Amino acid sequence: MPVSVTNSRLIYDALKACDIKIISALPETWLVHLIRMADEDPGMTLVRLAKEEEGVGISAGAHLAGVNSAMLMQNHGFLASINGIVSLALLYRIPLLLLISYRGYWGEKDPWQTQGGLVTEPVLRALNIPTWHLNNPNDIYRRLKDAQTLAHASLHPVAVLLSRDLMWEE
Amino acid sequence: MIRADALQAIYPELENRIVVTIMGAVAAELYMLGHRPNFFYLEHAMGLASSMGLGIALSMPEHKVIVVDGDGSLLMNLGTLSTMARYKPGNLLHIVFDNESLLSVGGFPTATSTGTDLAGIARASGVPRVTEANTLESLKESVTEALKSNKLTTIVSKVEAIGPKTFHMDLPLLENRFQFWRCLEAMRKQSRA
């Protein structure tokens, strides 16, 4: 499976540098290495979810309890989380660090991913969630730190879209 | 059993603990019994109170966390039972008041009114301790035992579909949020000292 181990490692190390202690996740192809790294790290609590919206509750609880967290999800998982994002995170001013694998976008071969790909950015814009397209491995460390800083300063969700260029080696 | 009486019966156990409630009638009834800065009322996002409780329990393992859930909310996020059961935080107590009704939005019957068994689902999901408590005495006893057990527990209590006259709470959502955040911060500092 040509998912980039190197870039997954850079992302994971950047999350560690952000003092992330809890990662919630649902498996998806591009995220397999990241989830494995979290699972193998004794300093990380990996919460494997049944549905991504639960992750909004986990991260809200962690934030109110003073712990930094991140949410790993596919863009369809983001779409499945919207009520939680609106009526918990936005309503109660909860910072969320959303790492979203951007399926169904440029170069997507799987037809079933394409509708989600088309609506991801319009939905993020409708929710007024600041979004960074992470394409360049040299950017990872700084942009994840920037995303967390903005989320905490604004008490608002911030999204980082993990692109095909970054995650897929083919 | 009337839920307001049930909350009153267990209030001494809730008073000094981290409590997350669902919206509507449950929040208003607990608030009227006596608001505390360690109480958070999730006034929307139905289904996520238990997920929030799990997030807090995993983040503050030295403190007990009590979630006050309801049948309508739990039915919207049944997966939460499997996620809680997977991580089994021993400091988390999940109380479900089952009035077989979406009372706060007009009293429409939920699936528990036609036989869905939430305690059964919790057991089948792998929650290590599941009890059913349908009287004030048994509920009080179940809560005390659950808190002593240091095992993840779900208590399902059947209650009548009766709520408060008003859902008004003199507590803006964000005031509750920041007050709760500060309170948890103080609790952590105190436990470190």
Image (spheres, rainbow, N blue to C red):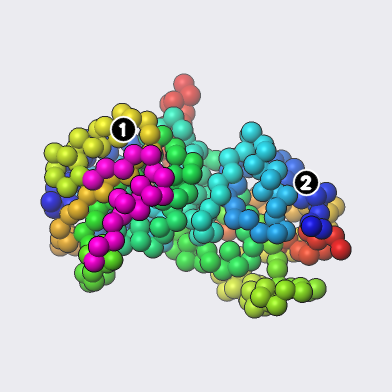
Magenta extent? B114-132
**Residue shown at the point (23%, 45%) measured from the top left:** B132
| Whether labels 1 and 2 share one chain | no
Whether B128 is drawn above or below A164: the answer is: above
Q: Residue at x 64, y 74 (%)?
A: A116
Q: Is residue B162 magenta?
A: no
> Which residue in the rendered view is the most extreme toward the top?
B193
Disc 1 residue type?
Leu
Quarter residue A169 falls in: bottom right
Q: Is residue A1 left or right of residue B28?
A: right
Q: Is residue A124 in sight in this rendering? A: yes
User: Which residue occupies 67% across, 73% down?
Assistant: A113
Task: Look at mark 1 in the image and give the residue it sits on.
Answer: B147
* Helix, strand or loop under label 1: helix
Q: Is residue A108 left or right of residue B62?
A: right
Percent position of residue A98, x then y = 62, 57
The residue wearing badge 2 is A9
In the visual, does B94 lie left or right of A49?
A: left
Q: Subunit of mark 2?
A: A
C-alpha distance separating marks 1 and 2:
40 Å
Q: Amino acid at mark 2?
A: Arg
Image spot of residue B78 (x, y percent) = 40, 57
